[in-house]
Image: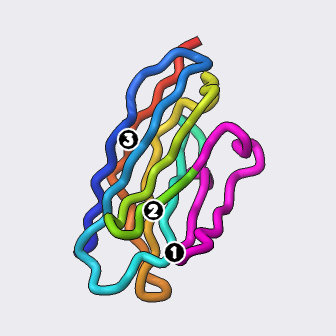
Amino acid sequence: QVQLVESGGGVVQAGGSLRLSCAASGSTFSFDAMGWYRQAPGKQRELVATILSGRAGITNYADSLKGRFTISRDNAKDTVYLQMNALKPEDTAVYYCYVRYAGRQSSWGQGTQVTVSS
C-alpha cells in the first residue's frame, strides 16, 4: 500500500513563500512520476506541477504558475518538493501530492491546506 505523507502547508501573507514536501513509501516499483495538484473551493482539481524520475527530471507546470513555483525531487528519499514563491490569494487551495508507479497505478495524498491572505 502506497503511502504519501505531505507537509509544509499553512497560512502566509501575499508575496510570501511556502515549501511543500511529500514523502512516498510502500511501493515495490519506483515512482516514475511525482507531482502536485490543487483544488480551490468550488473549483475542480488542477495540475500544479509534475516531475519524472531519472537524471533529466523532466518537469511540467501549469502555465500560470511558471516562474513562481518550482518542483523538485529527491529520488533517494522518494520525496517531492514544491517551492512556492510570490504567493497570491488565488493560490489558496488544498494541495495534493500525486505519484505514479508500475506504469498506470497512481496514489494521492490526503491534501495540505495552503491559505494566502491579502
Residue drawn 53% across and 41% down? Answer: 83
What's the residue type where badge 2 is placed? Answer: Tyr
Residue drawn 56% across and 36% down? Answer: 84
For disc 3, the marked residue is 112
Q: Position of residue 115 (x, y in %)?
A: 47, 25
Q: For residue 2, which quarter of the picture?
A: bottom left
Q: Quadrant of the N terminus?
A: bottom left
In magenta stretch: residue 52:
yes
For disc 1, the marked residue is 53
Q: Quadrant of the C terminus?
A: top right
Q: Position of residue 8 (x, y in %)?
A: 36, 37
Give the numbered dot on residue 37: none
Q: Does label 3 or label 2 sit earlier along the sequence?
A: 2
Above or below — where is 109 with respect to 65?
below
Above or below — where is 27 with respect to 50?
below
The part of the chain drawn in magenta is 44-70
Question: Quick check: 30 left or right of 4?
Answer: right
Between the C-alphas of marks 1 and 3, the distance is 23 Å
What's the residue type where badge 3 is placed? Answer: Thr
Residue drawn 33% across and 51% down? Answer: 110
Judged from the image, the secondary structure of the residue bearing numbered disc 1 is loop
Above or below — where is 93 with respect to 89?
below
Q: Position of residue 31 (x, y in %)?
A: 41, 76
For disc 2, the marked residue is 98
Between the C-alphas of marks 2 and 1, the distance is 13 Å
Marks 1, 3: nearer the viewer: 1
Judged from the image, the secondary structure of the residue bearing numbered disc 2 is strand
Between the C-alphas of marks 3 and 2, the distance is 12 Å
In magenta stretch: residue 91:
no
Above or below — where is 27 with respect to 37?
below
Residue furthest top in the image: 118
